Image (cartoon, rainbow, N blue to C red):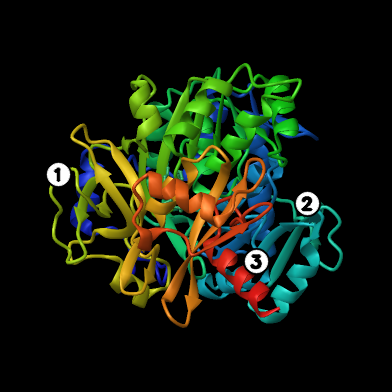
Amino acid sequence: MPVTSGVHGFVPFPPQRAAQYSAAGYWSGRTVDSLLRQAAGTWPDRIAVVDPLTSHTYSELDELADRAGAGFARMGIAPGERVLLQLPNSCRFAIALFGLLRAGAIPVMCLPGHRLAELTHFAKVSDAVALVTVDKAGGFDYRSMAKQLVAAHPRLRHVVVDGDAGPFTSWSNLPEGDPPPVVVDSRSPALLLVSGGTTGTPKLIPRTHDDYVYNATASAELCRLTEDDVYLVSLPAAHNFPLACPGILGAISAGAQIVFNADPSPEAAFATIDRHRVTVTALVPALAKLWAQACEWEPVTPKTLRLLQVGGSKLEPEEARQVRSALTPGLQQVFGMAEGLLNFTRLDDAVELLEHTQGRPLSPADELRIVDAAGERVAPGEEGELLVRGPYTFNGYFCAERDNERCFDPDGFYRSGDLVRQRDDGYLVVTGRVKDVICRCGETISAGDLEEQLLSHPAIWSAAAVPLPDPYLGEKICAAVVFAGPPMTLAELNGYLDQRGVATHARPDVLVAMPSLPTTPIGKIDKKAIVRQLCEDARA
Ligand code: OOB
């Protein structure tokens, strides 16, 4: 495996493509932390970050990042070393992120919802030497998890805690001093993102300074962010979407104000939007739907949003319509992945595009291939797996040689596992996941297709089609459903699907009504957890 810039386990861009991206101006040679330095120079006195407890101007944030960077370096964190970063949405998150970057460390962007199993895996794979975390948040004590993590991974030399540190180093006791001089190659990894897949343990995705700066600044330009915008961080800040699409980094590149909100409930979020006159935010479909519905009962509803980005999983056309009418006509669908490629609907797009597509690629240099199971290109407009390479799509998971052989084609295209159709106008419609199928009695049923049918029923609020083991059928089709009102019976549901022309063998064998569907730390429906829960219930 090719290794450059001294970071073992990192697969760099092939030199020829790297040279092209630099020559064409996609890569600017800037580092991620230079975005903050530049903003502090241009807008020193403008408010950069706000949370319920505090706020900082751009020059203050820049100085706090320098101080944190000096502290991390003096603690003994060396350039190129990996550090797990797990903080709730707060100004501290931004300070810690930029502090680590200024020390030349490579933050591993953990979400607050990750627990011991995931953190241990991230620590091992990244060979992390430190953890930056919080004392308690959302009713969870992160210090006791840190204790178990240190026991499982003794290479973790330092634990820095924001708040009451217990046995660990308190953030307020970070050593003081001048920031160290650190020279960073812009083609080296800036940070490691966590993959968002709902199958298997998450993998680590190195994003280089060049590619991530482009990711954030090109997204900011597409969304026309300016210093008059106020960006609300509603999703966990360490996720690629609120971090850099355009998110926090894009907002910084434009001198916009960033408001951190740790509570995405409509009540709390609507009050924050009102108070800070928030203009832009990003949500997953489940939250967007909840916010739209909450407009019916919340006394304060969003009035200032000019752009509401929704992505992370499929937003159905009817849901898009509801979101636009309740929250803002400025809906933007975003189909992205931590691995790189981003697709956006554009600000001036026709309503049909906003409601029925997941956008088109961000960059003219994004190269897409849509292929069938044999790896051959499908005919235009046909469904196939999306493969991609480009100026901000990664070239290999961190320290995962075996996965990488499987996940890339011989030309260096990443196999996304997403099924899409590309329309004549270049816009993508996401239709499902390659492996998200139910194999029932020799037939392969697409879970995505069935879910689309289920969600078309007004009594169904959310739905997942999952396989359950069956001695006769191999797998049977289970519809896990949250009803909007009184539940339907399986017979009623199947009568409805029959009317819509769904084949007998593709209709649910089992219907399970649930109060809510389990989700991943970012809020996507977690099918593995549904199957686990149903199998446990069956055994009990
Ligand atoms: C975003 O990133 P990840 O890494 O958490 O998840 C990526 C996967 C995609 O491969 C796709 O399967 C799914 O999430 N996805 C969508 C979608 N956006 C993401 N599926 C259907 N419709 C969409 N709009 O989820 C992410 C990263 C950056 C921006 C937005 C989302």
Looking at the image, is mark 2 or mark 3 earlier in the sequence? 3
351 left or right of 296 in image: left
Q: CA distance from mark 1 to mark 2?
A: 48 Å
> Residue 402 at what x, y percent from top left?
35, 77
> Residue 356 at what x, y percent from top left?
36, 33
Give the SS element for disc 1.
Answer: loop
| Label 1 crowd (10 A; few <14 / some 14-19 / many >=20) | few
327 left or right of 143 in image: left
- Residue type at mark 1: give it: Pro
Give the residue pinned by disc 3.
130
Quarter location, residue 50: top right
- Residue type at mark 3: give it: Ala
Circles 1 and 2: CB atoms closer than 8 Å: no
Instruction: Using the image as rendered, state which of residue 518 and residue 74 is in the foreground.
Output: 518
- Name which residue lies at 19% across and 48% down: 382
Q: CA distance from mark 2 to mark 3?
A: 23 Å
224 left or right of 349 in image: right
Q: Is mark 3 within 8 Å of ligand 1?
A: no
Give the residue pinned by disc 1.
380
- Residue type at mark 2: give it: Gly
Q: Is residue 45 above or below residue 483?
A: above
Q: Is residue 84 above or below residue 327?
A: below
Circles 2 and 3: CB atoms closer than 8 Å: no
Q: Is mark 1 within 8 Å of ligand 1?
A: no
| Label 2 crowd (10 A; few <14 / some 14-19 / many >=20) | few
Give the residue pinned by disc 2.
138
